[in-house]
Image (cartoon, helix red, strand yellow):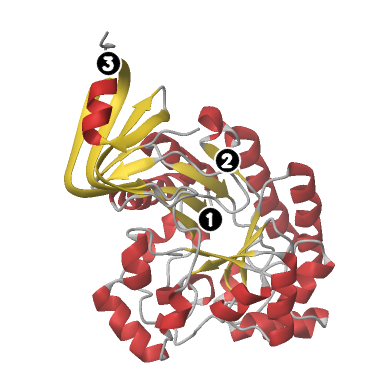
Amino acid sequence: MTLEPAPCDLLVKGDLILTLDAQDRVISSGAVAVADRAIVDIGPADELHTRWAPAEMIDGTGRIVMPGLVNVHNHTPLMVTRGMIEDIGFAPMYTPGIPQGHWLTEDDAFALSSLGMYELLRAGCTTVVDYYRHPGACARAAADLGLRAVVAGRVHDAEPAALTTGRYEYSRAVGEASLRENAELIERWNGHDGGRIRCDWAPHAPDTCSDDLLREVSRLAERHGGNIHTHLCQLPLEVETVVARSGLTPPQLLDKLGLLNERLIAAHCIHMEPADIELCGRAGITVAHAPIGNAKGGRIAPIIELREAGARIALCTDTSSGDLIESCAGPSPCSASIARAAYSTRALCWTGAHEREPGRSGSETWWARWRSASVPT
């Protein structure tokens, strides 16, 4: 007796199916069946055709079907700086003449974030860790466009205007406003659409947050759960400022305040002494590695040493949004940046760039080139 094919919502065919499962299976001329927003079958296409009757089919002939990519550190509203910061070698928040977060309105942030999220999806990135001013606009953009996102505010108490001139002026009012913005984000958006949108706390950096503000974020994050997102040892100025202010290196300060642990996703991690590398490794942090962004400033993160010390390594585009692979290893911009920084190819070693968020379960979001089908667990 021949069984009738079971109904499913979607069947995605491809010349190669990269499962990235425990056996790392690669299936030639394969297919993926989706029903009720979950993957229900993977295997040779001819077999799945006999088992499933899809309502919709994506023909991926000549293409690869694989888990969606994860961008673990990004700021979609900074699309506004595209073409302005590629060769300055300095972070936008510290740079005069560059559009700043406090200049943007909520509508500005939503439009820019929508553009950034769209570019991420077009390039196969289905999950993004995104944080900036007006984080509610970032969450709304991700919700509207169908991405899975972990969104946070930009918590700091350093006056942004003073920072662009090299001065650190800590303001309680600025800090309280940024805390309130992040708290309102969590209350409104955390868990949206069955958990597709999650929200966390994000102190901008150890130098732009006073010790008291970092201590408060540590308390709030402990109560909230989830991950914590920050920039760490991005610039020599950051390290010098924190050491002068607190008598500790940035990793030592975060460790003292309870923020350096397996829940921390720290971007860059460039200017670290061996003791800092060992400290971060023992803590089990996740390093958000931006190889091309770092190299544009003539900097190289000690990524191999961090990994060998015990840190987890994942990839990000930082302010670039767009194509995660091109931003990390694209032929044209990459060549100039790598030459400039004498970048070692060993530093391209990484893990966890597919749809698997650090510290959380793997997603079941798959994509065919130029078209994504988001199917959250």
Alpha carbon separation for disc pair 1 and 3: 47 Å
Asked if the residue under mark 2 is in contact with the one under mark 3, i.e. CB atoms within 8 Å, the reply is no
Q: Position of residue 327 (x, y in %)?
A: 35, 68
- Label 1 crowd (10 A; few <14 / some 14-19 / many >=20): many
- Upstream in the sequence, badge 3 or badge 2? 3
- Upstream in the sequence, badge 1 or badge 3? 3
Alpha carbon separation for disc pair 2 and 1: 15 Å
- Label 3 crowd (10 A; few <14 / some 14-19 / many >=20): few
Q: Which residue is mark 1?
A: 132
The answer to whether residue 224 is above or below residue 287 is above
Quadrant of the rendered image containing residue 245? bottom right
Quadrant of the rendered image containing residue 239? bottom right
The answer to whether residue 74 is above or below residue 121 is below
Q: Mark 2 against mark 1, which lies toward the viewer?
A: 2
Question: Which residue is nearer to you in this view: 82 or 371?
Answer: 371
Identify the amino acid type marked 3: Pro
Q: Mark 1 against mark 3, which lies toward the viewer?
A: 3
Instruction: Name the side, left or right, on which 128 lies relative to 267.
Output: left
Residue 5: mark in rendering: 3
Identify the amino acid type marked 1: Tyr
Residue ID at (31%, 15%) = 6
Q: Which residue is mark 2?
A: 198
| Residue at disc 2, secondary structure | strand
| Residue at disc 1, secondary structure | loop
Residue ID at (43%, 55%) = 77
Alpha carbon separation for disc pair 3 and 2: 36 Å
Instruction: Name the side, left or right, on which 67 lies relative to 199.
Output: left
Residue ID at (73%, 45%) = 225
Instruction: Name the side, left or right, on which 87 lies relative to 182.
Output: left
